[in-house]
Image (cartoon, grey):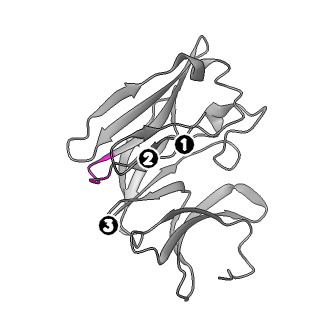
Amino acid sequence: MVLPKEFNEPRPVSWFPDSTDLVFVEWSEGNEHARSIWKLSILGGSPQKLMDDAYEAAVSPDGSRIAFVRGAVGVSGYCRLDLDCRYALGSEIWTMGPDGAEPRKILEANAEDHYGPPAWSSDGHYIVYVRLHGTAATNQFFIETRSLQTGKSAVIYSEPRFNREAEMLNWQPVVCWTRDGRLLNPV
């Protein structure tokens, strides 16, 4: 599979359930703050741009929605060594249809919160994400779920080890939801 040469740094992030379509994130050349989400069929054809100012996409289990992060003010949406993590995470979580239509804002952070990449529950009714709450006095990481039916969020885990030096991380805070309902958070 060959991408057109104008793609600078494509990064695959999620597969559709049929295993023939791939979602990837592209950084605009010369501007590592400009990200967009694209869809590509491994069977051929041209890539399809789904959304600008978007990254860290996750396709729902039935392929009907894509959850993603927007609004990072940091470098490429990553937490990197010696980079303040609050500026690398997003300020919003959205969903959209598989073709980029029907975008819906799911969460919007206040000035003290930022979100990590979303993941889907196996039934597609919830998303899970990492939230960094940072103030001048303290920083805390939380793993939270959000019901897409009711719009209610719930903290399901807060690990004090995540909070140490939370501003200067050398890892991307991410959480995965397995098909059997377990949550995984690599550290």
Q: In the figure, 9 relative to 120: above or below?
A: below
- Residue at the (43%, 48%) spot, across then down: 119
Is residue 111 part of the magenta span, yes or no?
no
Q: Pick the quarter of the image with the C terminus.
A: top right
Is disc 1 surrounded by few (<14), some (14 to 19) or many (20+) residues within 10 Å?
A: many
Task: Looking at the image, tell me whether mark 3 or mark 2 is earlier in sequence order.
Answer: 3
**Residue drawn at (76%, 66%), measured in percent from left and top?**
29
Instruction: Please say if 186 is above or below 45.
Output: above
Residue 131 appears at what percent x and percent y?
48, 32
Q: Pointer 3 and pointer 2: residues touching (CB < 8 Å)?
A: no
Residue extending furthest toward the front: 180
The residue carrying pointer 3 sits among few (fewer than 14), some (14 to 19) or many (20 or more) residues within 10 Å by Cα, namely some
Q: Amino acid at mark 2?
A: Ile
Q: Which residues are magenta?
A: 122-126
Which of the numbered marks, if any, corresponds to residue 93?
2
Residue named by callout 1: 90
N-terminal of the two: label 1 or label 3?
Answer: 3
Q: Report the mark closest to the observer, 3 or 2.
A: 3
Disc 1/disc 3 C-alpha distance (Å) = 23 Å
The amino acid type, in three-letter code, at marker 3 is: Ser
Local crowd at mark 2 within 10 Å, few (<14), some, or many (≥20)?
many
